Image (tube, helix red, strand yellow):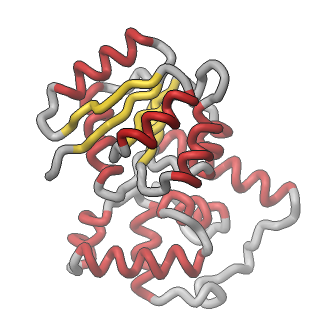
């Protein structure tokens, strides 16, 4: 695996420095910069073009949600991993909407942070199961409240193939592309091709949104 360039964005210097030292111990991760606020984060993202940005939500001036929105528009290839104290589903939901590929709490084990960086760099998403359950409940509540729960939306209506249905179910179960490929005895490239088609048909941006879509409509039940 090539070296992953990481930018750390957090308004607490002690946390930034600690994370930097921790990540630098990993030979495959290089901390290319640190930012203490949103404006500096945007400037360094432009200047350094990191592979992954480790982003806090609470910051003075421009918060992490606002930063994520701008980064999604200006630098869609940069992967965002949120690292925050907030475990409220509204924050998770909002960061998913803003394009975050991962969401961890600040009390996560160091190994979890490293693993999450590696996974999202490879195109996977990382969201703790207990947080995703809340997000899915949140989606369900909103759809029922406004009378838009499409309980009649069947697989046929969505024009999903049998293989796409299988893969969607495995995405809901939290499997990575590699795990899906091993389970279905197909190549990772084939899995990616099916997921691309699946996202287009569901009209969502990533696999996390696909999972939320499927569960909120009763197509699958998460384990």
In the image, residue 52 sits, relative to residue 26, either above or below, namely below
Q: Is residue 128 visible?
A: no
Which residue is nearer to you in this view: 207 or 174? 207
Residue 90 percent across, percent down from the top left: 67, 39
Q: Is residue 175 visible?
A: yes
Left or right, residue 76 beside residue 121: right
Which residue is nearer to you in this view: 30 or 84? 30
| Residue at far top of view | 14
- Among the 4 quarters of the image, the one containing residue 190: bottom left
For the C terminus, the quadrant is bottom left
Residue depicted at 42% across the width and 50% down the height: 78
Residue 189 percent across, percent down from the top left: 26, 77
| Residue at far right of view | 146
Which residue is nearer to you in this view: 46 or 178? 46
Residue depicted at 48% across the width and 36% down the height: 82
- Among the 4 quarters of the image, the one containing residue 187: bottom left
- Among the 4 quarters of the image, the one containing residue 149: bottom right
Residue depicted at 47% across the width and 33% down the height: 55
């Amino acid at each position: 695996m090539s070296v992953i360039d990481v930018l750390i964005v957090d308004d607490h210097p002690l946390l930034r420095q600690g994370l930097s030292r921790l990540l630098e111990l990993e030979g495959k991760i290089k901390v290319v910069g640190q930012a203490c606020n949103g404006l500096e984060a945007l400037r360094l993202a432009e200047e350094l073009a990191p592979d992954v940005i480790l982003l806090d939500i609470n910051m003075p001036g421009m918060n992490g949600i606002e930063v994520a929105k701008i980064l999604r528009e200006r630098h869609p290839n940069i992967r965002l991993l949120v690292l925050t104290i907030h475990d409220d589903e509204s924050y998770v939901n909002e960061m998913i909407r803003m394009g975050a590929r991962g969401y961890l709490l600040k009390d996560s084990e160091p190994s979890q942070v490293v693993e999450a960086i590696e996974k999202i760099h490879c195109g996977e998403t990382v969201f703790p199961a207990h947080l995703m359950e809340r997000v899915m409940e949140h989606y369900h509540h909103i759809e029922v409240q406004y009378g838009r729960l499409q309980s009649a939306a069947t697989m046929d209506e969505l024009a999903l193939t049998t293989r796409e249905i299988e893969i969607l179910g495995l995405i809901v179960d939290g499997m990575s592309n590699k795990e899906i490929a091993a389970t279905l005895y197909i190549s990772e490239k084939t899995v990616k091709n099916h997921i691309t088609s699946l996202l287009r048909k569901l009209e969502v941006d990533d696999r996390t949104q696909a999972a939320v879509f499927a569960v909120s409509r009763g197509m699958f039940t998460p384990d």
